[in-house]
């Protein structure tokens, strides 16, 4: 330890009126001769203030600070306390392959997964599938508008009925792949020979008349038996117009994209199309058979259902989960209300939501802190996937082999608001060449 030698006051006057602060010039000279004042980097270690170095004489060999350890700055686990959190523990090394990162695979420690969940960090950074689907659906809508231009001479349909979604006519939508049961199976009330307005018809009542088979397109019906089963899938890519597309893509690039980040692209892809297709299966069973339906709403509702799985599975990790639940409930009600818009089917919304609850429960990465919780989650996953398969089989078989209206006469009101224009949700909902049936 360094010692600081006091000023030798014997060099000053020694009378009775001696003032200790009135040190003679000789004293100052003596002090600076004994202790050199250093401006070296070492002398400025303590917040830029100089310190004394070792004495030339007197045996003071140490060059330490005058105050012990004054120049040492202790390590702190805190940054700016007004804004920052303590320094987090370094995460374990990421040994996942690039392919595993792309698809959201790989393993992480339990604590790391909990921290990621609290911060809202998903299993992958970019929602590639959501981006690709958005680009494809935009291109498909352009194709629809071009087709309507060729059929009616205008990009948007204003005759015989105005499409408020700013899109093609209903017959054009049927022709490009909308869900339309008379094109998918034999419907007694709307047989293939039923006459309706052609694709190029703009008059009301129709002056250009075609059969259902001609409107359905895709080569017609082999053996006069409608069997265009692919219409369970194609409506996912179609939209009724620009307004419909913008609303769906806004939800897809926000809610759906975040779900993909959290569960990975492969799991997201499965949930998305399982929900979208089964929503169309449910709608084909219970909606009015004469109303075409298009849109990715069922698939997007499916991704919304996954956020409900996440909320309840990770309730204690969520920030203000009660408030989040309230907002999600309001969003769900608004989405169901939009299902009454023409060309949009509430059954697709509700069916997509229900199926995604089951498939999402099966595939969503749920955090389990205990072995008991892990076993409960595993049991729920098994039950969910079995139930999802049963629903697919039962509803698909019901569509082809029985009359859904007989099983549930009131179900149509879940997607049809009764007015005089739709015969109060009675009949088929199809406008023929002479009347609405």
Image (cartoon, helix red, strand yellow):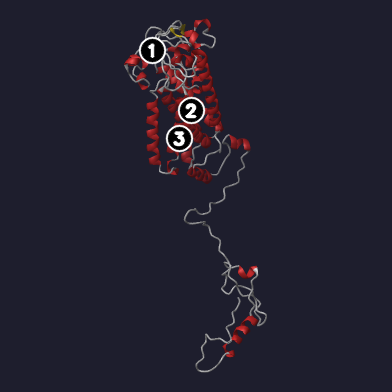
> Label 2's element?
helix
Report the mark closest to the observer, 3 or 1: 1
Q: Position of residue 308 (x, y in %)?
A: 43, 34
- The answer to which of 206 and 418 lies nearer the viewer is 206
Left or right, 200 with respect to 436, comes to right
- The answer to which of 249 and 320 lies nearer the viewer is 249
Q: Quadrant of residue 343?
A: top left
Q: Which residue position is annotated with label 3?
A: 307
Task: Mark 1: give few (<14), some (14-19) or many (20+) Cα within 10 Å.
Answer: some
Classify 418 as above or below 122. Answer: above
> Label 3's element?
helix
Report the mark closest to the observer, 2 or 3: 3
First in sequence: mark 1 vs mark 2: 2
Q: Is residue 20 visible?
A: yes
Q: Which residue position is annotated with label 2?
A: 385
First in sequence: mark 2 vs mark 3: 3
Q: Position of residue 151 (x, y in %)?
A: 50, 13
Q: Which residue position is annotated with label 1?
A: 428
Left or right, 395 with respect to 418, comes to right
């Amino acid at each position: 330890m360094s010692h600081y030698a006091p000023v030798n006051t014997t060099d000053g006057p020694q009378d009775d009126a001696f003032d200790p602060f009135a040190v003679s010039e000789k004293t100052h000279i003596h002090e600076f001769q004994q202790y050199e004042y250093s401006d070296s980097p070492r002398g400025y270690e303590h917040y830029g203030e100089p310190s004394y170095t070792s004495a030339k004489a007197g045996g003071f060999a140490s060059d330490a600070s005058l105050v012990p350890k004054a120049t040492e700055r202790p390590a702190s686990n805190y940054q700016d306390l007004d804004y920052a959190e303590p320094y987090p523990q370094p995460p374990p090394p990421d040994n996942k392959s690039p392919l595993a990162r792309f698809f959201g695979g790989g393993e992480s420690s339990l604590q790391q997964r909990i921290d990621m969940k609290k911060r809202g960090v998903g299993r992958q950074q970019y929602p590639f599938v959501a981006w690709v689907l958005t680009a494809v659906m935009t291109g498909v809508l352009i194709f629809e508008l071009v087709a309507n231009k060729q059929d009616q001479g205008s990009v948007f349909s204003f005759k015989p009925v105005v499409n408020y979604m700013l899109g093609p006519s209903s017959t054009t939508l049927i022709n490009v792949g909308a869900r339309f049961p008379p094109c998918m199976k034999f419907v007694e009330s709307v047989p293939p020979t039923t006459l309706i307005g052609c694709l190029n018809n703009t008059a009301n009542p129709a002056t250009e008349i075609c059969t259902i088979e001609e409107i359905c397109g895709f080569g017609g019906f082999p053996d006069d038996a409608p069997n265009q089963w692919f219409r369970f899938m194609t409506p996912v890519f179609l939209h009724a117009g620009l307004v419909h597309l913008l609303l769906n893509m806004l939800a897809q690039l926000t809610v759906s994209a975040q779900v993909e980040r959290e569960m990975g692209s492969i799991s997201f892809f499965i949930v998305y199309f399982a929900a979208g297709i089964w929503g169309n299966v449910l709608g084909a069973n219970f909606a009015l058979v004469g109303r075409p339906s298009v849109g990715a709403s069922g698939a997007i509702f499916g991704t919304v259902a996954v956020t409900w799985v996440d909320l309840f599975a990770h309730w204690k990790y969520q920030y203000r989960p009660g408030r989040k639940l309230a907002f999600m409930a309001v969003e769900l009600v608004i989405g169901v209300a939009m299902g009454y818009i023409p060309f949009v089917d509430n059954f697709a919304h509700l069916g997509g939501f229900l199926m995604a609850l089951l498939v999402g429960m099966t595939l969503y990465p749920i955090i389990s802190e205990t072995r008991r919780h892990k076993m409960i989650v595993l049991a729920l996953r098994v039950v969910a996937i079995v139930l999802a398969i049963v629903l697919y089989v039962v509803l698909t078989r019901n569509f082809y082999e029985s009359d859904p209206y007989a099983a549930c006469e009131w179900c149509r009101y879940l997607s049809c608001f009764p007015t005089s224009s739709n015969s109060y949700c009675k009949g088929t909902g199809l406008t023929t060449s002479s009347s609405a049936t």
